[in-house]
Amino acid sequence: GENVEQHPSTLSVQEGDSAVIKCTYSDSASNYFPWYKQELGKGPQLIIDIRSNVGEKKDQRIAVTLNKTAKHFSLHITETQPEDSAVYFCAPKNSGSARQLTFGSGTQLTVLP
Amino acid sequence: NAGVTQTPKFQVLKTGQSMTLQCAQDMNHEYMSWYRQDPGMGLRLIHYSVGAGITDQGEVPNGYNVSRSTTEDFPLRLLSAAPSQTSVYFCASNPTDVGSYNEQFFGPGTRLTVL
């Protein structure tokens, strides 16, 4: 099965700074790489994803980059705001498998005003 | 659409009691899953279903049963609750899975405490 490691486990940044979270996976068949955001007291919600035929994807202040050779992908948040404070999870997947997502252990991001 | 709904939001059980966590979705999704979330461990898959009448085990299935009699509902049963089952439980659904790339939609969670 997929072995997923996510770093760092906690991250504090000043408002306006950038944040980067890295996810390393083991299954070379993984070809779908989503990031989920979980706000306090809520379920996770997809914020951005990337497929293996793409190296980078941006959506306003967030971006995901993929290095398939090294088997890792990263979430980048620029110009951080207090509402970015949350727990972020990666969940790499082989889209050809019926098995549901294997999540990383999560990163608690705190944006300090 | 209400999306994915879960009941109850909170529950306290005594060791050995049984109960059912309810999950329903109104998006006509084929796939439904149950995860548990423990501090520092992310979300771990308990059971999942690829359609009505079909279920399979995830990473941590022991102590839990599921069934899928309709597309909409996917209840999770705790047969004899143990303190190790104290956790937050999330139900999720997605339209299809194999051969496609799909967002999972999560419910708001049920916080379960077993004394």
Image: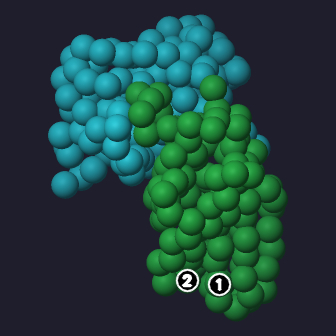
Mark 2 neighbour density, 10 Å: few (under 14) some (14–19) many (20 or more)? few
A57 sits to left or right of A24:
left
Q: Residues under labels 1 and 2: Cα distance? A: 5 Å
Quadrant of the rendered image containing residue A62: bottom right
Question: Which residue is identified by label 1?
Answer: A78
Residue beneath the point at 61% across and 20% down: B60
Specify whether residue B46 is in view. yes
Question: Which residue is identified by label 2?
Answer: A61
Q: Amino acid under label 2?
A: Arg
Q: Of residues A49 and B104, which is closer to you in this image?
A: A49
| Figure colour of chain A | green
Q: Amino acid under label 1?
A: Thr
The chain drawn in cyan is: B
Q: Of residues B6 and B97, which is closer to you in this image?
A: B97
Q: Chain of mark 2?
A: A
Residue beneath the point at 26% across and 24% down: B51
In the picture, the disc for residue B15 is: none
Q: Could you say where residue B54 lies in the image, as x and y percent from the top left?
A: 30, 15
Residue beneath the point at 34% across and 43% down: B100
Q: Give the secondary structure at mark 1.
A: loop
Same-chain check, marks 1 and 2? yes
Q: Could you say where residue A39 lies in the image, as x and y percent from the top left?
A: 56, 62
Specify whether residue B23 is in view. no
Residue beneath the point at 55% across and 58% down: A35
In this figure, which colouring scheme has been used for the structure? by chain
Q: Chain of mark 1?
A: A
Q: Of residues B40 and A55, which is closer to you in this image?
A: A55
The reply to whether the C-beta atoms of the residues labelled 1 and 2 are less than 8 Å apart is yes
Q: Is residue A80 shown above or below B91? A: below
